[in-house]
Image (tube, rainbow, N blue to C red):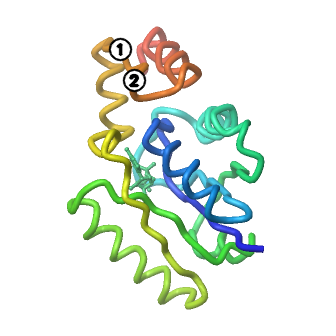
Amino acid sequence: MRIAMYPGSFDPVTRGHLDIIKRSARMFDKLIVAVLINSAKTPLFSVEERVALLKECCKEIPNVEVRSFNGLTVNFAQANHASVMVRGLRAVTDFEDEIQLAHTNHALLPGIETVFLATSLEWSFLSSTIVREAAHYGQDVSKFVTPNVEAALQAKREEGRV
Ligand code: ADP
């Protein structure tokens, strides 16, 4: 059984992330979407909120599991028998960080391979940061995120958190 892991902050999940999830779920027997707890960034959504939003978005894809994790990504991968790490590449600007991460992970755990998926052109400009910014200014984000994420952003806006 080929198990892949798609790690990230997903703060919040965007249609760009979902495109990568759908495409990689077709390539592997099981895909674990792993939400990083110990991010250096201060997240807008708590890890529980990020996991819940992702679960709702992925409920119709049977081989996708959403989990959160702490610590080193490779340790989580090993504990869950994942041999492949999936990452999305938007533009050359992503490449430098991503190649460094891939080499580090491979050095830490030689059994792990990183697979890069080129993002769909449609979402190549999109990031969680852009979505948070647009929500902050009260812009319509329905093009970028699913309705449950849009509602969650609206709730944060009403709380004055976005
Ligand atoms: P991180 O903080 O680890 O970069 P993100 O949640 O921002 O976490 O991204 C997780 C993964 O999803 C990364 O591989 C990133 O390149 C990819 N990704 C981010 N935005 C998009 C997008 N619009 N389309 C496709 N992939 C994306």
Label 2 is placed on what type of residue? Lys
Question: Which residue carries the number 2 mark?
Answer: 143
- Between 101 and 62, the residue placed more toward the observer is 62
| Residue pictured at 62% horizontal, 55% vertical | 34
Label 1: element kind: loop
Q: Nearer the viewer, mark 2 or mark 1?
A: 2
Quadrant assignment, res 141: top left
Can you name the residue that lies furthest to the top here? 158
**Which label sits on residue 47?**
none
Question: Which residue carries the number 1 mark?
Answer: 140
Residue 34 vs 112, above or below: the answer is: above
- Between 7 and 126, the residue placed more toward the observer is 126
Residue 85, horizontal then vertical, whole percent: 55, 69
- Dot 2 alpha-carbon crowd within 10 angstroms: few under 14, some 14 to 19, many 20 or more: few
| Residue pictured at 43% horizontal, 67% vertical | 116
- Dot 1 alpha-carbon crowd within 10 angstroms: few under 14, some 14 to 19, many 20 or more: few
Residue 123, horizontal then vertical, whole percent: 35, 41
